[in-house]
Structures are given as C-alpha cells and as structure tokens.
Amino acid sequence: MSPQAPRDHLDWPFFGPEHRELVSDLARWVSERFADSRHPESREAVDTHCRELVQAMGAAGITRYCVPGAHGGALPGFDARAICLVRETLAFHDGLADFAFAMQGLGSGAISLAGSPALQQHYLPRVAAGTAIAAFALSEPEAGSDVAAMSCAARRDGDHYVLDGTKTWISNGGIADFYCLFARTAPAQRRADGTVGAQGISAFVVEAGDPGFAIEERIELMAPHPMARLRLAGCRIPVARLIGQEGEGFKVAMRTLDVFRSSVAAAALGFARRALSEAVRHAKSRRMFGRVLADLQLTQAALADMATGIDAAALLTYRAAWLRDRGEPVTSAAAMAKMTATETAQTVIDRSLQMLGGLGVVHGNVVERLYRDIRALRIYEGATEVQKLIIGREVLAEKTGDGVRT
C-alpha cells in the first residue's frame, strides 16, 4: 500500500477550503494510482508512461489546474497554491507524475498568459483534458541561464514566420504535441557594459508535425523522463501562432516562470517528505545492537534536522505561492523558496539514503530513485547559483541601510 503524504500544513493560513478539498480528492486518486512502486526505466517505457499519466490526470480532472477556468481549468485563473499542492502530492508518490503535470502547465503557460483568444481556445482545453501534451522550449546549447544569449531566429515571410536554430534540454521533447518556443525576431542589442539584452525575443507555438521541425537527439537523464534536443530548419508556422506581441517573448517567459517556479520548490518538498517517511519507517523497524535504529540519539537528531528543514522550506514555498496569488511581487520570494526547498530536499534525501545503508543504493529502492529525482531540480528553472544572484539583486535594490524596505 502506498504511504500517504502529510497534510498537516493545510491548516496554515495560506490555504482556503478549495485547497483542502483539492488535496483530499487528489489523495484518493494517488492512493489508487500508485498502489505499487513500479517505475519504467527504458526511454520507450517512460514515454508511454508519461502519455498515459497525462491522459489519466486529464480524466481525473487534475490537469485542469494547469490552465485558467475560461478554457477548461478548475479555477478562474492560475492558482499557484493549488499547483504547488498538486505537485507536492504527486512528487511524494511518483516523480514522473509530477513531471507530467508540471509540463502541462509550464508548457502551455505562455498561451494562458499572453496567447490570442484563438490560440487559447485551440490549445488550452486539450491541455486541461489531457488530450494534448505541451512543452516549453526556451534553452539552447549556448543559452541556458543566460536567456539573452539566444540565437534561434524567426523571420517574417508574408503570412508566416520561418524559424531556424536549435533548442536543447527540452522536457517532453519527442512526445509533445506542441511547443511554446522562443526565438529572436530582432538582433540582440549589446549594452554599454558589454552584456546582451533580452529585447527582440518572441514567443511562438510550434507543432510537432510542422515542416522543418525535427527531434535532433533524445537526451537520457539519470532520472528518466522525456527530454530532447530540437532542430528547426526553415520551419514555417502561421503568423497567428505568435504568442503576444513580437519582441515581448522574454517578458512572456519570465511571467510564465513566475507562476511555476514556486511549484518546483513544492515538488522538492514532495520528494523530501517521502524520503523522511522512508527514513522513519526504516528507523522504527531496523534492529541494531539489541534495539531499533530509532532508539539511537544520532538517528533522532538526524530526523529532527530533516523535519525542521522540510517545514522551513514549506513555509517559504507556500508564502511565495500565496504572494503570487495575491498579485504581489514574487521574484525574490520564489527564488528563496526554489533554492531552499531543492537544497534542503537534497540534504534530506542524502541523509535518508545514509540511514538505509546498503538498501539505499539498491537500484529501484524508493530513496535511491529520489536521490536521482532531486538532482535535476537544483538546476532547472534556474540553478541554485542563479537564485542567489536574483535574491542578492533584490536585496540590494529593495533595502536601505537600516533594513527597511523602500
């Protein structure tokens, strides 16, 4: 029987009755869906599993939280707290389920936020229903954390745009039906300090069957999920698939990430809570030196550190989501949450693995899988080092010498 994710934090004032009802309904679904611990490893099996997960979550109404209510969503607009709660719960049980849900939201988020009514009506209901798989194509071989270094180009040709370039580290690459893809419609402008600005980037919808679009290479990760390198060679798409205004793509990308960055922290919480659950279960049953592991003070101290770190990260995570839902600035809060939750989860999972000893490094063990799952979260949607830069800039910009915000 699958263990149950803790729900004590639902009593915190960040949440309303709709959030508690969501988690209650979701708990029933995951307890049935993840009653066993089988996880696919081959690329083909992972691809199939992800498609099935999206369809199953669509049928259960879970992917409705990925889009606004006007287009089949569960709530009137994006609710960051609901998205975080779904991700935390799914991550506790299955990393691929969390990934599949997250990419439906992130992959279509640009359309939800800035797409024309026609684009929204065409794509979003299918995302909500789980009948179309979305992807977010921002990164390039030379433009990861430094988005302004993007070189993928789009030029206007009558009623079409023609796209040329390469995208890499694209989650859902190879299984997505469409990609919210970012490309340059104007040359990069170099500032006086030598850095390149992000002006001139635009956002588009590229479909998997568009002429000139191809999967150049599938990327195999330590924690398997669909990922690929994309090639666009004279890829022609209708002008109507421009998302927002030409040249506004960077702003669209940042708005999308602002919605979903705190949810990365929530996924890390789910991983960390499962690792703590596994550590407690093992500590209570593992006999050692005439007693159980849980009787040892070193074990109790480790569990105390793990539980305290998780609660601290959860407070930052749901504060960030609450601030976003209130329409308040969230850049620094989301960066703090993402950095703290992912780094804490790495530490918690490592301690859990150490506590399990040899069992912790057996392939297929829950904690061994979590150890592989968590590592990528410290990198994608802004590595820890990038989050520190964001927080540092915000501190310098928003605080005076006496510590009072200006």
Image (cartoon, rainbow, N blue to C red):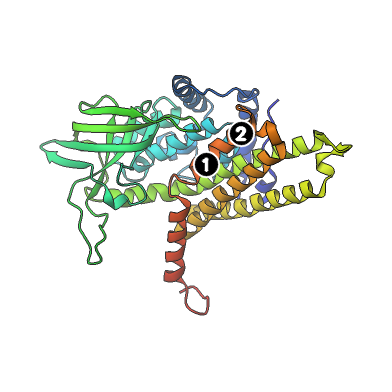
Evaluate whether residue 404 shows in this view: yes
Q: Quick check: 90 left or right of 353?
A: left
Callout 1: SS: helix
**Other-residue count near label 2 (Cα within 10 Å), few / some / many at <14 / 14–19 / ≥20:** many
Q: In this view, does 8 lie above or below 166?
A: below
Q: Is residue 369 above or below residue 382?
A: above
Q: Quick check: 244 left or right of 398?
A: left
Label 2, label 1: how far apart the Cα atoms are: 12 Å
Q: Position of residue 310 (x, y in %)?
A: 64, 49
Query: Residue flagged by tag 1: what amino acid is it?
Result: Arg
> Residue at 51% across / 28% down in the picture?
57
Question: Observer-nearest residue: 195 or 177?
Answer: 195
The residue where tag 1 is placed is 375
Q: Quick check: 65 left or right of 185?
A: right
Q: Position of residue 85 (x, y in %)?
A: 57, 42
Q: Residue furthest bottom?
A: 402
Q: Are marks 2 and 1 in contact (CB under 8 Å)?
A: no
